[in-house]
Amino acid sequence: MKTQLSNPTPVEVRAAREAAGLTQAAAGAVVHVDLRSWQRWESGERSMSPAHWELFQIKTRRARRT
C-alpha cells in the first residue's frame, strides 16, 4: 500500500532541525540546499518538498542512532 507523503509545516521543519541539533546552514547541507532555501522552509515562504523532508528524516535518524 502506498503512503501519501505531504509537505511538512514550517513548525515541523524547525522542530526536526532543532531535534537533530543542527543550525539552519548545517540542516540545509544535509539535504543539499543552501541556507536561504532552509530559511524559506522554516519561515513558510516556501514549502519543503516531501522528498527533501523524507531525506532529512532518514539522514538525521541514522546520525542519531550511531
Image (tube, grey):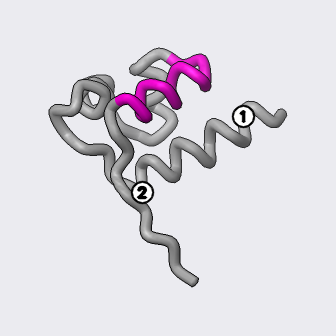
Q: Are marks 1 and 2 in contact (CB under 8 Å)?
A: no
Question: Could you say whether the residue bearing mark 1 is in a helix, strand or loop?
Answer: helix
Which quadrant does the N terminus fall into?
A: bottom right
Report x, y in % for residue 42. Answer: 31, 27
Report x, y in % for residue 17. Answer: 50, 26
Q: Which residue is mark 2?
A: 51
Q: Residue furthest right?
A: 66
- In the rendered structure, the answer to whether residue 14 lies left or right of residue 18 reads left
Return the mark for residue 52. Answer: none
Which residue is located at x 46 percent, y 41 percent?
31
Report x, y in % for residue 61. Answer: 69, 40
Front position in the image: 3 or 37: 3
Tell me if residue 50 comes above or below residue 45 in the rendering.
below
The total number of labels drawn is 2
* Amino acid at the residue labelled 2: Ala
Quarter where residue 45 is shown: top left
Quarter where residue 36 is shown: top left
- In the rendered structure, the answer to whether residue 38 lies left or right of residue 30 reads left
Does the magenta portion include 55? no
- In the rendered structure, the answer to whether residue 55 lies left or right of residue 10 reads right
- In the rendered structure, the answer to whether residue 13 lies left or right of residue 39 reads right
Report x, y in % for residue 19. Answer: 59, 23
Q: Residue furthest left?
A: 45
- Label 1 crowd (10 A; few <14 / some 14-19 / many >=20): few
Q: Which residue is mark 1?
A: 63
Magenta region, mostly helix, strand or loop?
helix
* Amino acid at the residue labelled 1: Ala
Which quadrant does the C terminus fall into?
A: top right
The magenta region covers 11-22
Does the magenta portion include 20? yes
Which residue is located at x 31 percent, y 45 percent?
48
Which residue is located at x 38 percent, y 29 percent?
11
